[in-house]
Image (spheres, helix red, strand yellow):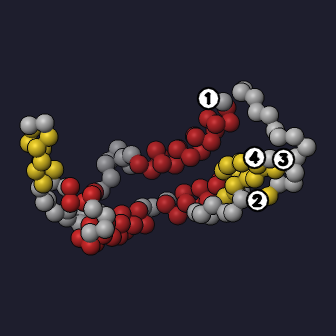
Amino acid sequence: MNVKMTRVLLTLLTPLVAGAGPRNGVAADTAALPAPPPTPVEAVTDTLHGTLVVDPYRWLENGADPKVQAWTEAQNAYTRQVLDAWPGRAALTARYDTLFAIDTAVGATVAGSRVFLERKAGLARMRARPARIPALKSPPSFRAC
């Protein structure tokens, strides 16, 4: 691994590791956390190759089911509540935003004498439309490094 990659990984992982462990030798107070929403058990039994297989959470596999959607929304709300209460999260999010707020080329396509780049702007979640690059005299050649 090169030095630059090592620095990037240390910059990103250090705040997570530092904030995740015990503080002053005492484990984090989990009693202050709210209880997660319950997950109902609805066992489904199948026979696979002569063996009974019981899956108590198979009902969660149907994402279109209103019960599953309600369970997912409750889990997401719980997760958001816990993460938003984490001290230092706002500072860490701001730091990540500054590190990742750069335009990125996420793909290139050669079509004849033209190269089309697929670009993601800054912190955008959706990819932008491909940007057009002026015609090249000859298609680029790629060599293995």
Residue at 45% x, 50% y: name it: 19
Q: Which mark is residue 131?
A: 2
Question: What amino acid type should be assigned to the residue bearing mark 4?
Answer: Val
Residue hosting label 3:
113
**At numbered mark 3, what does the secondary structure look like: helix, strand or loop?**
loop
Q: Secondary structure at mark 2?
A: strand
Q: Residue 79 at x, y = what percent?
A: 36, 63
For marks 1 and 4, give the one nearer the viewer: 4
From this viewpoint, is residue 11 visible? Answer: yes
Residue 52 occupies quadrant: top left
Q: Mark 4 or mark 1, which is nearer the start of the sequence?
A: 1
Please give the residue where the numbered disc 4 appears in the rendered image. Answer: 110
Along the line of sight, the residue nearer the viewer: 74 or 14: 74
> Cα distance, mark 3 to mark 1?
35 Å
Task: Give the mark nearest the N terminus, 1 or 2.
Answer: 1
Residue pointed to by mark 1: 1
Q: What residue is rendered at 41% in x and 62% in y?
A: 83
> Closer to the camera: disc 1 or disc 2?
2
Precedes in sequence: disc 3 or disc 1: 1
Left or right: residue 67 versus residue 41 is: right
